[in-house]
Amino acid sequence: MGNWLVYQNGKVIRTIPGNQIPGQEEKEDDKPTWGEVYDFMRRAIKANPGIVVK
């Protein structure tokens, strides 16, 4: 999984490594499930209207 790029108003404001989600404990080889990624993205977008994640 590559990196997530978080955009706000057309600018990249953050890069998230594909194998970790902010707020989660870092563990070796602990890849998030798509459900966790989806929940995180949904919360992030809800909290910050105008954010786009690619």
Image (cartoon, grey):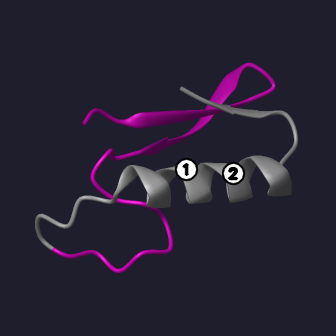
In the image: residue 40, left or right of residue 32: right
User: Of the residues shown, which amino acid type is indicated by label 2?
Assistant: Arg
Identify the residue at image location x=12%, y=71%. Answer: 28
Residue 16 magenta-drawn? yes
* Circle 2 crowding by C-alpha within 10 Å: few under 14, some 14–19, many from 20: few
Residue 37: horizontal and vertical position, in percent?
Answer: 47, 53
Residue bearing the label numbered 2: 42
As drawn, the residue found furthest toward the bottom would be: 25
| Count of labels in the image | 2
Dot 2 lies on which element?
A: helix
Q: Residue 26 appears at what percent x and percent y?
A: 28, 75
| Residue 6 lies in quadrant | top right
Extreme residue toward the front, this view:
35
25 is within the stretch colored magenta: yes
| Cα distance in 3D space between marks 2 and 1 | 6 Å
| 11, above or below 19, in the image | above
> What residue is drawn where x is 48% and y is 65%?
22
Res 7 → quadrant: top right
Give the structural element (helix, strand or loop) at label 1: helix
The residue nearer to you, when weighing 15 against 44, is 44
**Is there a contact, CB below 8 Å, between mark 2 and mark 1?**
yes
Q: Which residue bears the numbered disc 1?
A: 38
Q: Nearer the viewer, residue 7 or 37?
A: 37
Residue 4, given in percent of the width and then of the height, sits at 44, 36
* Residue type, label 1: Tyr
- Provide the residue span drawn in magenta: 1-27
* Location of residue 14 by image quarter: top right
Within-10-Å neighbours for mark 1: few <14, some 14–19, many 20+? few
Tell me the quarter of the image containing the N terminus.
Answer: top left
